[in-house]
Amino acid sequence: MTLAFRNRIDVTLSVADRLITGVDIQPRTRPPLGRLFAGKPAEMLLAALPRLFSLCASAHQVALLSALEAARGERAAPLTRHRRIKAVVAERFAELVRGLLVAPLAENRNAAQLVQRLLQAVASLQMHSGAQQQSRAATLSQIKTDMVALGIGLAAEPVLPGTPLASLMDMVRKAADDGGWRHMPAEHDILSAADDGAVVAQLMDVGSAFAEAPELDGRAPETGVWARYAERHQLASAGPVERLSAKISEVAELFRWIEAGEAEDEAADQHAIASYALGSRRGGAAVECARGRLHHAIELDAHGAVSRFEYLAPTEWNFHPRGPVVRSLTGAALRGTGDREAINTMVGSFDPCVGYHLAFREMADA
């Protein structure tokens, strides 16, 4: 299946008198999956998801399966739910490792080789989750060794000194603090599991118009790594340094859970997967994936085929026209030659699931 859609976000900053006076976001174009799969068996949609979403494919499949069960009045067995949580968490771990290390360390040849070996081990762990204990232990040992070598601390110290990741942290801190742009503290508003009911109801009642620019009673909250970290620790919004630290901390935390044997769902995330009955043959679900909270909603016809289907990815919240990215940039002062790099780092810290392009538009002074 080939779908033609705009798979990039354009972020344009309006600047007047060295102040960011406006942030215009041109969102990506989302594939119309509800229309494409209407009247088709739900299993056909389920099978197509890995081809349609190269990132977080497991999360999308688990979300759809959970929504289907809710629509059919079914409930996943505890063992099934546990296996799904393991798959979602393993994927979240792999996605965060890739986003944290691949592009930022690409110019460091030795670090890039370590990253490649680490990703191969992580992929092996995902593909062979039921491997013999000895093989699994060897893979985990390799992952741990490479993580430490790259600088991910697995104990009290989140970033180990003298490592590639420590150098990256210094670069991010320098771009943010040494005479360059200063981010604006945005209003603290987080999308949580408590919002699930309202989100899936809006997906079902309003459809794609809601999914393209979602908001809840005027709210456009943040979701993702920083949101999870801030909610746990009751922190305010932060800049790229704090966001990078949060990502490193979550990678270490997820690895500890995987290494411990994935014995407790609650230790991973008590809201990792949730499903909601929305009426006759209607169901919704939420999955906490690498980039934030993912929602699906589905309605089946009398024959069990897809009547309606909607999904809402985390990127649409974070890159909402009045969302966290916009709030973090609007009103900020540009102060030096490192402004573009610092702003690019800040936008990238929201980790969109598609590429983005950053542009500046100089406005005439008032």
Image (tube, helix red, strand yellow):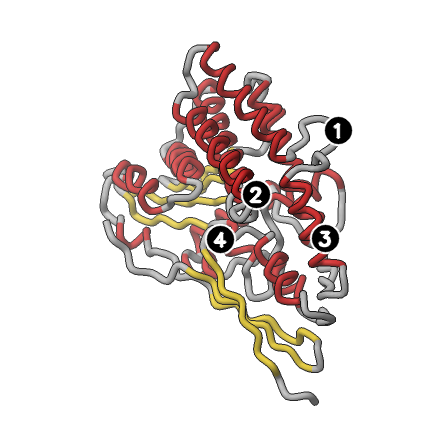
Q: Given this view, does label 2 or label 4 mark the residue nearer the observer?
A: 2
Structural distance between the alpha carbons of marks 2 and 1: 19 Å
Q: Which residue is mark 2?
A: 100
Which amino acid type is marked by label 1? Answer: Ala
Q: Nearer the viewer, residue 111 or 315?
A: 111
Q: Which residue is mark 1?
A: 156
Residue 292 visible, this angle:
no
Q: Which residue is mark 3?
A: 173
Which amino acid type is marked by label 4? Answer: Gln
Structural distance between the alpha carbons of marks 4 and 1: 42 Å
User: Residue pushed farthest front?
Assistant: 109
Which amino acid type is marked by label 2? Answer: Leu
Structural distance between the alpha carbons of marks 2 and 4: 33 Å
Q: Residue at x 54, y 71 (%)?
A: 359
Tell me if label 4 and label 1 are in contact, CB under 8 Å.
Answer: no
Circle 2 crowding by C-alpha within 10 Å: few under 14, some 14–19, many from 20 = some
Q: Given this view, does label 4 or label 3 mark the residue nearer the observer?
A: 3
Q: Residue at x 66, y 76 (%)?
A: 21
Nearer-N-terminus badge (2/1): 2
Q: Nearer the viewer, residue 16 or 266?
A: 16
State the SS at label 2: helix
Which amino acid type is marked by label 3? Answer: Arg
